[in-house]
Amino acid sequence: MKNPISSIQTTEQILFNDFSQLIEQSKSFVIAQANSVMTMLFWNVGKRINEVILKNKQADYGKRIVSTVSTQLTEKYGKK
């Protein structure tokens, strides 16, 4: 015959584990949603800067950044 106290502890542990998993899944979902919203925010900010300030032209500093990063990546990974 099973000990009723150990059965209660087992049930409590199962519930604790289930609830913990639900909480962790919910936290992960909220983080993913927040990241998605923040990504869209930054994309829209960049789009507006491009349209209003840069008039859909690449900024001079952008050309330098692309060139610099390209050189760094080529040094690290080589040309393919």
Image: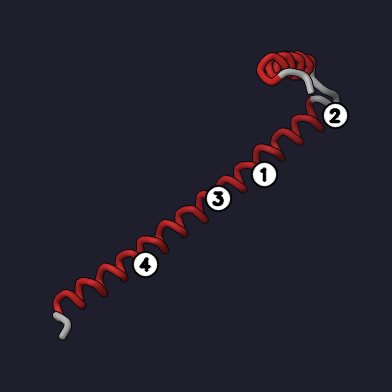
**Distance in Å between CA atoms under marks 1 and 3:** 12 Å
Q: Which residue is mark 1?
A: 40
**Distance in Å between CA atoms under marks 4 and 3:** 21 Å
Badge 3 vs badge 2, beta-carbon distance below 8 Å: no
Question: Quadrant where the N terminus lies?
Answer: bottom left
**Distance in Å between CA atoms under marks 2 and 4:** 52 Å
Q: Look at the numbered disc 3 and give the secondary structure of its residue.
A: helix
Precedes in sequence: disc 3 or disc 2: 3
Q: Is residue 63 above or below residue 18?
A: above
Badge 2 vs badge 4, beta-carbon distance below 8 Å: no
**Distance in Å between CA atoms under marks 1 and 2:** 19 Å
Residue kind at label 1, given as amino acid type: Met
Precedes in sequence: disc 4 or disc 3: 4
| Circle on res. 18 | 4
Precedes in sequence: disc 1 or disc 3: 3
**Distance in Å between CA atoms under marks 3 and 2:** 31 Å
Q: Look at the numbered disc 4 and give the secondary structure of its residue.
A: helix
Residue kind at label 4, given as amino acid type: Asp
**Within 10 angstroms of label 4, few (less than 14), some, or many (20 or more) residues?**
few
Numbered disc in front, either 1 or 4: 4
Residue kind at label 3, given as amino acid type: Ala
**Distance in Å between CA atoms under marks 1 and 4:** 33 Å
| Circle on res. 56 | 2
Precedes in sequence: disc 1 or disc 2: 1
Horizontal and vertical percent position of residue 72: 68, 15
Please state if 47 lies on the left or on the right of 27 as rendered.
Answer: right
Please state if 31 lies on the left or on the right of 17 as rendered.
Answer: right
Q: Look at the numbered disc 2 and give the secondary structure of its residue.
A: loop
Q: Which residue is mark 3?
A: 32
Residue kind at label 2, given as amino acid type: Asn
Residue furthest to the bottom in view is 1
Numbered disc in front, either 1 or 3: 3
